[in-house]
Amino acid sequence: MLKQLQSALNWRGLVAISGFFLTWYLVCALELPGFSEIPNPLEVIQMFVREYALDDHYWLSWVTSFQRVLYGFLLAQLFGIPVGLLFGTNEKFRNLFFPVFELLRPIPPLAWVPMSILFWPTNESSIIFITFIGAFFIIVINVFDGVRDIKREHLWLALSLGAPRRVIFARIMLPSVIPSIAVGMTLGIAITWDVVIAAEMIASDSGLGRLTWEGYVSSTPEVLVIGMISIGLAGYLSTKLVNVIERKMMPWRRGRQ
Amino acid sequence: MSAAGSISVSSVQKIYDPKGASVHAVEDCSCEIPSSKFIAMVGPSGCGKSTLLNMIAGFDSPTTGEIRLDGELLVDASFRTPPNSDRVVVFQNGALFPWKTVLENIAYGPIVQKTKTREQAEEEAFELLRKAGNLERIANAFPGQISSGMQRRVEILRALINQPKVLLLDEPFRAMDTVSKSKMHQHLLDIHHNLKPSILLITHDLVEAIFLADVVLVMTTRPGTIKLSIEVDLPRPRSKEMILSERFIELQKQAIAAVHEEARKAFERGEKELA
Amino acid sequence: MINRSSKKLLLIIGITTSVILWYGLVQWTPFKSFNRLPDPLTVIIEWTSTDPDYGLSIFSKDYYLHILYSTYRATVAFFLALVLGVPLGIMMGWRPNFNAYAGALLDFLRPIPPLAWVPIAILILPGDEPAVIFVTFLVAFFATTLNTLLGVRSIDPDFLRAAECLGANSSDVLRDIIIPGALPTIFTGLQIAMGAAWFSLVAGEMIAAQYGLGFMILESYNLVQYPTIVIMMATLGIVGYSSSALIRFVGKRMIRWREQATGMGQGLETR
């Protein structure tokens, strides 16, 4: 009975998505107000197959964007996890720097663009910096929350069994914090993509964001749509990748359901 | 007070099919809850007691067999009377609505069934609180502000205000300490004595079962069926001293023997609880 | 354990150190790129002067004009997201069939970053202003819907069953169980949505708007008015934080029962 339910869910999803494409096609074919310049799905597919599927420049854009996402994301993990752990475990550090952190956190990552451009020597590094900012705050907050949530009982148990501080840190704290890191990663990857694309549109000459923007500026909306779909696909793939990593990080979660 | 209902369960079978491996939760289970009687059901964890209760309440249907209320068909494989105030459930972990006050919780049933206006329902709820031991002072508290013992009492009142034909209690006192639990036992006995609803109590606590009930049904491990029906012939009104009487201890021995045998079987099979 | 007065001391030291670090990086390091940054002193003087060099300070009218534009756009987008997202999320959480349709569609559209929608929005909608608001709305909408859905799903099924026993019909359940039960998670979602709205608003303003804080940040860069950049960034931070705080405050008022419950039953206990 459950299997039938699962396949039923799938066909409904397909119906919804097919409905979406159908609506899109009709809306453009009928040239409803506002949609006169929008290409219909068939035109988009045609242009893609004709000019982009085999175009080096297109796939290079994928690589460029992915690279930026990767570097920014990894850097954010590299700095974010330790800072989060420090905030959670060291009261002095927390009292010193958490207020500054909280003051900076509400500033949207893209607001950093001009400062970043002024500060960093190359264009690429300024983009990666902004990507880093986007994910950094999320990771720190999630890790910080994760440390705070560690059951005191676990810590007390370890202490009463005579474990030295280093062991407690490595064997109890780190594993307990892994789920929070995972949550931070999942949230972070979405933000990272958003930031990379935005940064590319505003301040770069390469990548999928740039491609999309150029489609708009050069009045070839097919390219625009190709860009959007490519970006969506890339983002979706990244999220799936992070999910796989998440599952590897937390094998004990498999028993759920 | 409307007439207490009688429940008859006939050859009920319930098969779940999680991921293809069919699980026989309940197999050829038959029992009776006569009108105004207090029936307790005991057995090892995961043996299907809650499944049966859910079916009586209308949350689930049997695969085969039928359940009747006062002779009328309640549920069978193709027909299910939706949950209503004829059979009200008091849940294991408590299901008082946290965002409503105690008074609003108790008055909820009649208001939503439109059998009383808000003023009438709240008045009656207030009266019930008073009669239940001068509890009217918690009328405007939220469930999160009162102890779990009081929460249980409020939940039972919330059920009773609807004058149900059958009161279904799914391990309601499981998480309570001994002192609160024994107070709850007294309350339940008083309710049964004064209002005489039919009651089905599911519990792990054998002493509780024998102390409160007229009949104790012992269920086997999965697939669950009634293994033993123990008639509790202790006089009513029950009193604490009876627990130490010879007859009580004898009944306890019977129950323990039956339950432990089943529990051992379940343990050996490495069974996991269904829910 | 660190006592209160030393906590305050550390706070001041922390902030002071950061500011000095900033100042030091700008003025004393030999890197040219650092030297181009505005230093804290200049920024504060500019921000609080009655006759700012670049026209924007707490005393200038235009400053508040930009704040108003951005706040207006964010508010409109947020309320649209609220009005559309919460009901949708409830429907999706409550009725699994509906969720099967809507969920697939949302999962399909959600990975597209907000800024990628801007050009399409400009083409379809009349004018740049609606396009920017639309893109801001979209991000907030996804966040709201998702969190509302989670909120509904997290309601203990026993509450629904209890309501059924007591004779509640569908609309009773919606009004008395689902909405109050999901409300805490909904408010958390609304805070997230507000943050997401500001994120995407800034991006949208940078690309496609006149006036507004995001627009001004990029504009100040282009006009080589660097201290203004920092002023705008700080203002954004303040406004963003305040809007989230406001939502949190409203949420606390509406969910009184939770606040009171954490008092752990003191004073109303009986023997």
Image: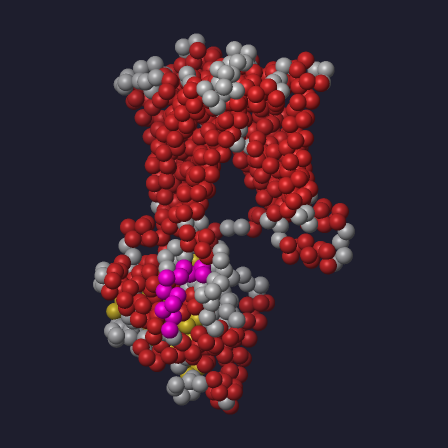
Q: Nearer the viewer, residue C137 or B122?
A: B122
Say above or below: A195 vs C224.
below
- As drawn, A76 above or below C173: above
The percent position of residue C26, horizontal first and vertical second, equals 66, 19
Which residue is depicted at the point 31% across and 15% down? A36
Kindly give the residue lying farthest to the top in the view shown. A218
Determine the residue positioned at 37% across, 50% down.
C180
Is A241 positioned to the left or the right of C158 in the image? Answer: right
Displayed quadrant of residue C168: bottom left
Residue in front for this viewpoint, A158 or A41: A158
Asked which colour scheme the image uses, the reply is: secondary structure
The reply to whether residue A139 is in sight is: no
Taking the magenta stretch, the answer to whether it contains residue B139 is yes
Percent coordinates x, y for residue A60 in the rendering: 57, 16
Q: Does the segment drawn in magenta span residue B244?
A: no
Nearest the eye: B111 or B167: B111
Q: Is residue B126 visible?
A: yes
Across and down, in percent, residue B166 comes to 32, 71
Residue A180 located left or right of residue A156: left
Residue in front for this viewpoint, C144 or C260: C260
Q: Find the magenta span and give its range.
A: B134-145
Give above or below for A229 relative to A87: above
Number of numbered discs on residues = 0
Q: Residue furthest toward the bottom?
A: B246
Residue B149: image location, x then y, percent: 46, 69
What residue is rendered at 52% in x and 32% in y?
A106
Q: Is residue C187 left or right of residue A171?
A: left
Asked if residue B181 is positioned above or below residue C246 in the image, the reply reads below
Left or right, residue C83 beside residue C36: left
Residue at position x 51%, y 82% in the image = B252
